[in-house]
Image (spheres, rainbow, N blue to C red):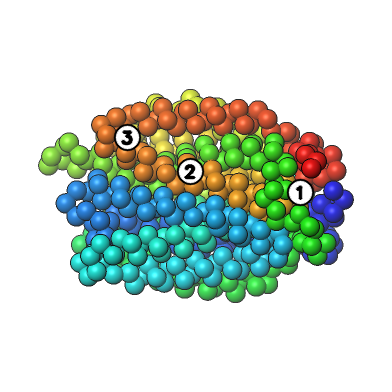
């Protein structure tokens, strides 16, 4: 375990030499820039699928075409465990930097493909298959991005400020959503729905590919945070070794399930949820695509500001207490909040309710990376964080929209909130098995960590 203390100390590079605060800030900026680009590329699909869904799927049923588009979004999430495994293993054996460079190249390629995809009018049902393949590529890339970035930012952050610095992973993750939403707002107000549906929906994917090239250049200057000894460890990047840390594995999996689920419910799904409120009110449109895009842009901007604040709180009260606030909120709030949002008759009311949910969710998202990284030793931190997170994220985060729309199409929409609460109760049990990071962190206190390896 001695190697973990050497290679994972506060603000150290590959040599273990202390870094200045400014060097730490530069590393955080460079690493998080790629995170922003990758999530922007991934989320443009969610924000613009309302414009192109019927060009690839059923054209005469809006709810069904949105459900099919959400299904493709879910399949992209199912690729995340593969990406988490491949790139997590690469992060442990080849280094965090190399893993992050490869993942962003793959995302760049996926975005370019999205920009030139033919529609069903051109190639029939083959269009949906091509869309699925491209989303699988992007899912693979973003699945690899999370683990490598989370571990790198956790390791490079200054001791005592890890929660604050690591929160910028979700600042940029949500920033990717915000930029996608903001672009939707700009294009809606300047071009209009008809022009976007006519083909301008492809532009965001071109922008995403170009931004990936810029991020690639920024990441090339990153210092590696792992040592050669750590990368050459015979168990480095081994999932079998991850399973020898069962407490860490199941806690990370448990908190990811509800964290990912509610994150996507109150961000990407909200767009569809509000849009579908118009059904059953002929001649009266409560919310339209433009007003919903405006609302989600404002909500996401507020959500971004919450991240460093909640991350700083975790440095003071401990990650476990942050997580307890989060899961208790997710047990108590989804049923009344989703009910009130569904009945909201003004955009302001809906926005306030969404922000209330985001305030509790930020207690998780702000420390999502660091809370997991602190449970695994350095030689399996990349795969332990990336692959384990990707399993829970793909099953519950990626399916959030699809499951919600399924409940709605089955005529039992309100029951979706109960589904969210049930998952939150399971995650509450996982949080109870967490240790206080201020005493048990494999980054700061590797030798005394309570997340011990099972021999064998």
On the rendered image, what quadrant is the C terminus found in? top right
> Residue 285: percent from the left, percent from the top?
19, 43
> Residue 280: percent from the left, percent from the top?
17, 36
Q: Which mark is residue 407?
A: 3
Q: Which mark is residue 237?
A: none
How many circles with numbers are drawn on the protein? 3
Mark positioned earlier in the residue sequence (2 or 1):
1
Mark positioned earlier in the residue sequence (3 or 1):
1
Left-right relation of 79 to 55: right
Q: Residue 371 versus residue 456: which sits nearer the camera? A: 456
What crowding class fits label 2: few (fewer than 14 Cα within 10 Å), some (14-19), or many (20 or more)? many
Q: Are marks 2 and 3 in contact (CB under 8 Å)?
A: no
Q: Residue 123 versus residue 61: which sits nearer the camera? A: 123
Residue 129 shows in the view: yes
Asked which quadrant contains residue 311, the reply is: top right
Element marked by disc 3 = helix
Left-right relation of 168 to 68: right
Q: What residue do we see at 78% from left, 36% from top? A: 450
> Residue 157: percent from the left, percent from the top?
72, 54
Report which residue position mark 2 lands on: 395
Left-right relation of 456 to 287: right
Q: What residue do we see at 52% from left, 45% from top? A: 393
């Amino acid at each position: 375990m001695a190697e973990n203390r050497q290679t994972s100390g506060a603000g150290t590079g590959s040599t273990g030499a202390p870094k200045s605060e400014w060097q730490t800030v530069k590393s955080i900026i460079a690493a998080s820039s790629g995170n922003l680009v990758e999530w922007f590329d991934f989320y443009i699909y969610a924000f613009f699928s309302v414009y192109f869904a019927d060009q690839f799927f059923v054209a005469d049923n809006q709810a069904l075409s949105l459900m099919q588009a959400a299904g493709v979004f879910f399949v992209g999430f199912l690729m995340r465990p593969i990406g988490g495994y491949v790139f997590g293993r690469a992060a442990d054996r080849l280094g965090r930097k190399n893993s992050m460079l490869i993942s962003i190249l793959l995302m760049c390629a996926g975005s370019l493909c999205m920009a030139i995809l033919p529609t069903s009018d051109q190639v029939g049902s083959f269009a949906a298959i091509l869309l699925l393949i491209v989303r699988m590529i992007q899912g693979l890339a973003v699945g690899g991005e999370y683990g490598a970035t989370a571990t790198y930012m956790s390791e490079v952050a200054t001791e005592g400020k890890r929660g604050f610095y690591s929160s910028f992973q979700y600042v940029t993750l949500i920033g990717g959503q915000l930029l996608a939403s903001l672009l939707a707002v700009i294009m809606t107000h300047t071009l209009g729905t008809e022009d976007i549906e006519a083909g301008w929906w492809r532009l965001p994917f071109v922008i995403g590919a170009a931004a990936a090239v810029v991020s690639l250049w920024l990441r090339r200057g990153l210092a590696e945070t792992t040592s050669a000894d750590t990368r050459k460890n015979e168990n480095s990047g081994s999932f079998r070794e991850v399973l020898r840390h069962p407490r860490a594995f199941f806690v990370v999996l448990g908190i990811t399930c509800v964290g990912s689920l509610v994150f996507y419910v109150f961000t990407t799904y909200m767009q569809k949820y509000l849009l579908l409120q118009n059904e059953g009110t002929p001649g009266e449109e409560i919310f339209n695509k433009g007003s919903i895009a405006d609302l989600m842009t404002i909500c996401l901007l507020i959500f971004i500001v919450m991240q460093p604040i909640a991350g700083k709180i975790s440095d003071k009260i401990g990650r476990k207490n942050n997580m307890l606030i989060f899961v208790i909120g997710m047990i108590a709030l989804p049923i009344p909040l989703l009910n009130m949002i569904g009945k909201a008759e003004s955009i302001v009311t809906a926005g306030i309710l969404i922000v209330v949910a985001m305030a509790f969710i930020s207690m998780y998202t702000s420390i999502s990376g660091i809370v997991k990284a602190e449970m695994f030793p350095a030689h399996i931190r990349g795969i332990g964080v990336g692959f384990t997170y990707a399993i829970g994220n793909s099953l519950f985060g990626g399916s959030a929209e699809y499951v919600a729309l399924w409940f709605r199409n089955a005529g039992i929409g309100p029951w979706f909130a109960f589904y969210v609460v049930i998952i939150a109760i399971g995650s509450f049990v996982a949080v109870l098995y967490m240790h206080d990071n201020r005493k048990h962190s494999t980054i700061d206190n590797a030798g005394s960590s309570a997340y011990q390896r099972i021999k064998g």
